[in-house]
Image (tube, helix red, strand yellow):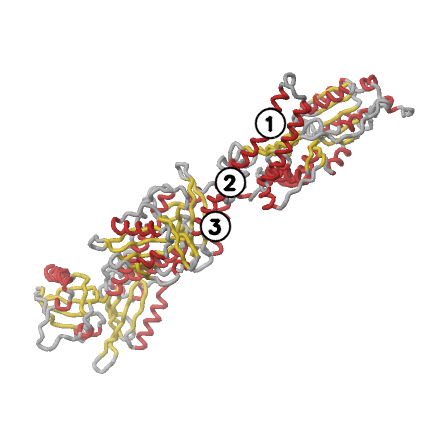
C-alpha cells in the first residue's frame, strides 16, 4: 500500500506542497474539509485556505521548516467548506529528495477549535470572578482539610493584616485570630456545620496584631468528595465592622493555571490485523529507556488503572473491524502520566481484507485539565455568589442597559426581567437614595472611581430591602470604557438591626436623662439632712425630725424607682414584693445551700463571713433569695474547678453589704459598662461558653433596687475574677416583750457565779472571735480567746475550761479533731459548742458524732447562746434551783 493510501485513512488533514507552496496532494479528509477545490490541472497555494491575519505566522513556520530541514508547528485558522474558520494545529514536515535536498513540505492539521474556545471561556470566567470579588471587596478562601492549610485571597489577607503575597496559611493561624472568649463557640458551631456538609454562615470577631478588633462574616460550603471525609471547605469572608472604613486593595489575581494551549505530540503506530503492533512511530518520548527493540506493546506503557479498559476497548475495535477511539494514560519517559486520545483506522486490501491498523494518539492532557479547571472555576463562582447572597450586575455604557447574572441568591431583587434600561433599573431604587446611586454610577462610568461601599434601598413588591454595592469600570482592549460591573449584597437584616439599635440607644438616653433628673430632687434634702446630723449640736432641728425627713425622701425615692421601672415590670411580669423581717444570715445561708451541690461537684471552696451580731432586713425572702442565688450561681459557674468563692457580709448604721468574690474568668473592660444595660442589643455575657446569667443581671439589678439597694460588679480583667457588691438597707429587729425587772434575769445566775465559769472561744476569724468574747465578758464570764488549734490546746491545758466555743473550719486542725483533743473520752466537761457556718443535715450529724453538745450556725443567736452558758452556773446545776 502506498503512503497516499495510508494518508487517506488518517482523520487528520494531510497535504503536501512544493517549495513554492503549491499544493500537490491532499488526503480524503483534507479534501472533504476544504470542500474538494482541487480539480484536475488546478493550481492552488496553501495560503488560500488560511485566515488572512494568520498567513504570516504560517509562512514563518513554512520557511523555517524548508530552511532548517526540521518539522515546525504553528496554530492557525483554516477555512472550512462552509466558509467558517476553525483553529487547527499545523505540523509542517520538510520533504527531501534522494540527494537530501528539500523539495517541499508535508502538512498535518488537527482541529483544536473547541480547545481554543474553552481557553477563551476560561479567561472570561477568570476575569468575571476577579471583577466580582474586587467589586464586592470580599475575601475568598479554600481550606485543605488534609494538609490543614488555607489558601486565601489577597483581599482576605489584607483583612487579617497579612502581607498580600501570603496566599497560604495554616488553618490554626486563622483560628488563633479569634478571641479566646469566642473560640470554643466558633469551633463548636463550625464543627457542626462541617459534619452536616451544609452551607454555613458565621459571624465572629478577630483580633489583629495591631490590637484592632474586627467583626467578620464568613459563608462557605463543604466538599466531602466521594467519601464521608471532608476534603475541603471553600467560601467567602467580608468585613462587617460598622466603623471599618479603611480602603482595601483589589484582590490580587490567583496564579493562573498552566497555559491551556501546549504543543501536543501525536503518536502513531501500526498494528497487524490481530491487533498486535509491529511498528511504532515517534514514541521516543514514551518508550522505555532501553529503546524500542524490546518489542513492548503500546498497552505495556498504559497506566495500570487504565490497562484493562484500554485493552477491552482495543479488542472491541479489532473485533468490529471498524474505526474507533479510546482514551487512556501513558507514562512518559520523565515519569509523568499523560492523557492520550487515540483513534484507530483499519487498512484493507483491494479485496476488502483487513491487513493492518493505523493508529494515532494525541496528547490531550492539557485540554482535559483546562476543561476540568473551567468547570471547577464556574462552580466556585456560583458557590461564592450563592454563599455571599450576592448578585453581579452589568451596566453597558454603549446602550445604558442593565443586566445581571441569574443566580438564585436574592429573589426579591431578581423578581422580574433580568435586563432593563438604566432609567427603569434606577426607578426601582428608593426615591430618597436614587440621586446618590445615579451620581455614583455616572462617576464610576466617567472616571472609574468608586470611593466606598454604597448602601441604598430597593422597593420591590411593596417591600423594602437594603443593598450594599461596589462597582468597577471595565475597559475594552483599546482602553475605552466598556461597562460597569457592580456587586450587590443583601444587608437588609443588618441594616434593620442597625436602625433599631439607633432608636433603642436614643430611648435609652432619654430614660437615663429622666432618671438622673428625678433622682437629684430627693438627693438634695437627704444630703442636707446628713449634714445637719453631723452638726446636730449646732442644728436647730431635732434628730428625730431629720430622720423623719430622710425617711420621707427614702420613701419618695422607693416610689420613684417603682414608677420608673414600670416598663421592666411589663416586660418581665409585674413584680410585687412581699416584705417581712428577715435575718441576713438566714438569707445568705439559704442561698449557699442552694448552690452548694454545684460548688461541691466542681471542687470549689465556699467561704462565708458574717457580722457577729444579727442583721435584720425588711425584704421579700423569695426575691432576696433570687438575687443571691443568681449571683452565687454565676460566681460558681464562671470559676474553674478547684477555685474559690467568698461571701462576706458587713453592716454599718444604715446598710448591709453582701460581697461575693470569685477568682474565676473575670469580665472584659469593654463589657463592664454595659453589664446591666437594659437597652443593649445582642448577647453580652461574661463567658460565651457558659451562656447568660440566669434570670439576667438586669432583673437582679431591678430586684435589688426594688429593695432600695444597689448592686455593683467589678473585675480587674479577663481571668482575674469578679466581685459583686449588693448593698441593702437595714431594718430594726422585730419587737419582743421586754423582761420584767421583777423577774429573774435570763441567765438565772449572779454576776459572781458567771465570773467563776471559764469560757474558751476558738475561731481563726479574729473579729468574730474578739466580738464574741466581748459579749461573753459583758455578761461576766471569764473568757480566753484562741485563733488556732494549737493555741487553744495550750490554753485548755493551762486552765480548766467549762465551755468551749469551737469554729469547725480552722486552718491547722479542724474543730472536730480539736474537740476530741480538748475533752477526753468519757468526760462531760468542758461543754462543747460548735459555732460554724455549715448548717445542713449532714453537718449536724458530723457535729454530734464528734461529741459536741450543741450546734450553733453563724451568725449565732446571742440570746440562745447566753441561755446555754447560764445553764453551766452552779445555781442552774443545783437540783433546788427553780
| Neighbours of disc 3 within 10 Å: few (<14), some (14-19), many (20+) | some
* Quadrant of res 382: bottom left
- Name the one closer to the observer, 182 or 437: 437
Dot placed on the residue nearer the N-terminal end, 2 or 1: 2
- Name the one closer to the observer, 467 or 850: 467
* Quadrant of res 94: bottom left
Mark drawn on residue 190:
3
Mark drawn on residue 508:
2
What is the quadrant of the C terminus in the image? top right
Q: Residue at x 41, y 55 (%)?
A: 387
Looking at the rendered structure, the secondary structure element under dot 3 is helix
Looking at the rendered structure, the secondary structure element under dot 2 is helix
Dot placed on the residue nearer the N-terminal end, 1 or 3: 3
* Left or right: residue 181 compared with residue 485: right
Is residue 838 placed above or below 313 in the rendered structure? Answer: above
Residue 792, horizontal then vertical, whole percent? 72, 22
- Name the one closer to the observer, 679 or 590: 679
Residue 405, horizontal then vertical, whole percent? 34, 59
Dot placed on the residue nearer the N-terminal end, 2 or 3: 3
Mark drawn on residue 67:
none
| Neighbours of disc 2 within 10 Å: few (<14), some (14-19), many (20+) | some
Q: Are marks 1 and 3 in contact (CB under 8 Å)?
A: no
Mark drawn on residue 525:
1
Which of discs 1 and 3 lies nearer the camera? The answer is 1
Q: Residue at x 51, y 44 (%)?
A: 683
* Left or right: residue 871 compared with residue 402: right
CA–CA distance between discs 2 and 1? Answer: 28 Å
CA–CA distance between discs 1 and 3? Answer: 59 Å
Q: How many marks?
A: 3
Residue 41, horizontal then vertical, whole percent? 8, 76
Which of discs 2 and 3 lies nearer the camera? The answer is 2
Amino acid at each position: 500500500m502506498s503512503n497516499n493510501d495510508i494518508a487517506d485513512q488518517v482523520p487528520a488533514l494531510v497535504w503536501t506542497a512544493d517549495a513554492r507552496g503549491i499544493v500537490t496532494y491532499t488526503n480524503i479528509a483534507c479534501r472533504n474539509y476544504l470542500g474538494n477545490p482541487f480539480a484536475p490541472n488546478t493550481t492552488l497555494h496553501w495560503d488560500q485556505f488560511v485566515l488572512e491575519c494568520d498567513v504570516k505566522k504560517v509562512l514563518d513556520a513554512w520557511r523555517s521548516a524548508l530552511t532548517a530541514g526540521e518539522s515546525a508547528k504553528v496554530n492557525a485558522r483554516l477555512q472550512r467548506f462552509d466558509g467558517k474558520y476553525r483553529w487547527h494545529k499545523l505540523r509542517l514536515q520538510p520533504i527531501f529528495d534522494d540527494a537530501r535536498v528539500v523539495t517541499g513540505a508535508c502538512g498535518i492539521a488537527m482541529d483544536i477549535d473547541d480547545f481554543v474556545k474553552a481557553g477563551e471561556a476560561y479567561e472570561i470566567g477568570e476575569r468575571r470572578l476577579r471583577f466580582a470579588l474586587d467589586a464586592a471587596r470580599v475575601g475568598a478562601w479554600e481550606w485543605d482539610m488534609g494538609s490543614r492549610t488555607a489558601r486565601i485571597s489577597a483581599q482576605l489577607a489584607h483583612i487579617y493584616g497579612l502581607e498580600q503575597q501570603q496566599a497560604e496559611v495554616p488553618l490554626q493561624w486563622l483560628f488563633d485570630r479569634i478571641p479566646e472568649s469566642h473560640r470554643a463557640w466558633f469551633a463548636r458551631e463550625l464543627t457542626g456545620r462541617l459534619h452536616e456538609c451544609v452551607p454555613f454562615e458565621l459571624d465572629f470577631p478577630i483580633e489583629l496584631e495591631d490590637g484592632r478588633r474586627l467583626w467578620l462574616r464568613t459563608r462557605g460550603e463543604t466538599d466531602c468528595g466521594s467519601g464521608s471525609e471532608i476534603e475541603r471547605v471553600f467560601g467567602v469572608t467580608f468585613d462587617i465592622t460598622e466603623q471599618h472604613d479603611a480602603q482595601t486593595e483589589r484582590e490580587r489575581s490567583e496564579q493562573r493555571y498552566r497555559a491551556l494551549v501546549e504543543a501536543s505530540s501525536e503518536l502513531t503506530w501500526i498494528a497487524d490485523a490481530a491487533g498486535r503492533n509491529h511498528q511504532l512511530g515517534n514514541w521516543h518520548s514514551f518508550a522505555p529507556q532501553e529503546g524500542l527493540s524490546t518489542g513492548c506493546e503500546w498497552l505495556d506503557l498504559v497506566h495500570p488503572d487504565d490497562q484493562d479498559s484500554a485493552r477491552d476497548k482495543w479488542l472491541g475495535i479489532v473485533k468490529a473491524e471498524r474505526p474507533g477511539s479510546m482514551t487512556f494514560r501513558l507514562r512518559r519517559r520523565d515519569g509523568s502520566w499523560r492523557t492520550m486520545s487515540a483513534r484507530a483506522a483499519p487498512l484493507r486490501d483491494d479485496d476488502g481484507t483487513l491487513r493492518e491498523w493505523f493508529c494515532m494518539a494525541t496528547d490531550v492532557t492539557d485540554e482535559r485539565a483546562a476543561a476540568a479547571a473551567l468547570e471547577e472555576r464556574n462552580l466556585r463562582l456560583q458557590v461564592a455568589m450563592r454563599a455571599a447572597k450576592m448578585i453581579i450586575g452589568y451596566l453597558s455604557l454603549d446602550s445604558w442597559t442593565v443586566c445581571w447574572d441569574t443566580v438564585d441568591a436574592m429573589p426579591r431583587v431578581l423578581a422580574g426581567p433580568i435586563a432593563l434600561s438604566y432609567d427603569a433599573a434606577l426607578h426601582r431604587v428608593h426615591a430618597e437614595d436614587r440621586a446618590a446611586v445615579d451620581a455614583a454610577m455616572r462617576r464610576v462610568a466617567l472616571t472609574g472611581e468608586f470611593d466606598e461601599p454604597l448602601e441604598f434601598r430597593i422597593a420591590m413588591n411593596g417591600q423594602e430591602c437594603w443593598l450594599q454595592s461596589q462597582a468597577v469600570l471595565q475597559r475594552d482592549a483599546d482602553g475605552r470604557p466598556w461597562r460597569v460591573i457592580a456587586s450587590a449584597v443583601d444587608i437588609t437584616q443588618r441594616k434593620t438591626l442597625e436602625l433599631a439599635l439607633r432608636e433603642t440607644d436614643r430611648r435609652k438616653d432619654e430614660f437615663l436623662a429622666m432618671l438622673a433628673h428625678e433622682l437629684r430632687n430627693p438627693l438634695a434634702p437627704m444630703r442636707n439632712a446628713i449634714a445637719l446630723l453631723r452638726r446636730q449640736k449646732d442644728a436647730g432641728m431635732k434628730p428625730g425630725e431629720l430622720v423623719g425627713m430622710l425617711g420621707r425622701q427614702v420613701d419618695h425615692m422607693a416610689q420613684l424607682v417603682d414608677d420608673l421601672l414600670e416598663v421592666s415590670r411589663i416586660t418581665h411580669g409585674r413584680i410585687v414584693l412581699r416584705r417581712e423581717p428577715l435575718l441576713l444570715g438566714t438569707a445568705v445561708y439559704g442561698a449557699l445551700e442552694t448552690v452548694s451541690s454545684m460548688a461541691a461537684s466542681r471542687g470549689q471552696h465556699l467561704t462565708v463571713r458574717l457580722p457577729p451580731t444579727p442583721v435584720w432586713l425588711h425584704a421579700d425572702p423569695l426575691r432576696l433569695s433570687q438575687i443571691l442565688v443568681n449571683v452565687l450561681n454565676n460566681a460558681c459557674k464562671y470559676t474553674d474547678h478547684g477555685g474559690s468563692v467568698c461571701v462576706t457580709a458587713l453592716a454599718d448604721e444604715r446598710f448591709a453589704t453582701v460581697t461575693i468574690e470569685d477568682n474565676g474568668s473575670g469580665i472584659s473592660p469593654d463589657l463592664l459598662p454595659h453589664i446591666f444595660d437594659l437597652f443593649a442589643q445582642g448577647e453580652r455575657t461574661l463567658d460565651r461558653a457558659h451562656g447568660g446569667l440566669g434570670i439576667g443581671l438586669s432583673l437582679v439589678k431591678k430586684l435589688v433596687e426594688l429593695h432600695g439597694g444597689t448592686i455593683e460588679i467589678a473585675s480587674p480583667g479577663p481571668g482575674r475574677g469578679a466581685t459583686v457588691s449588693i448593698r441593702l438597707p437595714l431594718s430594726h429587729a422585730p419587737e419582743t416583750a421586754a423582761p420584767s425587772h421583777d423577774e429573774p434575769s435570763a441567765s438565772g445566775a449572779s454576776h459572781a457565779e458567771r465570773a467563776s465559769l471559764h469560757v474558751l472561744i476558738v475561731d481563726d476569724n479574729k473579729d468574730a472571735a474578739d466580738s464574741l468574747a466581748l459579749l461573753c465578758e459583758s455578761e461576766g464570764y471569764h473568757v480566753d480567746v484562741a485563733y488556732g488549734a494549737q493555741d487553744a490546746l495550750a490554753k485548755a491545758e493551762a486552765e480548766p475550761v467549762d465551755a468551749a466555743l469551737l469554729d469547725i473550719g480552722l486552718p491547722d486542725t479542724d474543730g472536730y479533731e480539736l474537740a476530741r483533743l480538748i475533752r477526753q473520752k468519757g468526760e462531760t466537761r468542758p461543754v462543747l459548742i460548735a459555732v460554724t457556718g455549715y448548717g445542713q443535715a449532714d453537718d449536724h450529724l458530723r457535729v454530734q458524732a464528734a461529741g459536741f453538745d450543741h450546734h450553733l450556725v453563724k451568725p449565732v443567736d446571742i440570746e440562745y447562746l447566753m441561755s446555754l452558758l447560764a445553764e453551766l452556773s452552779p445555781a442552774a446545776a443545783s437540783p433546788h434551783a427553780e
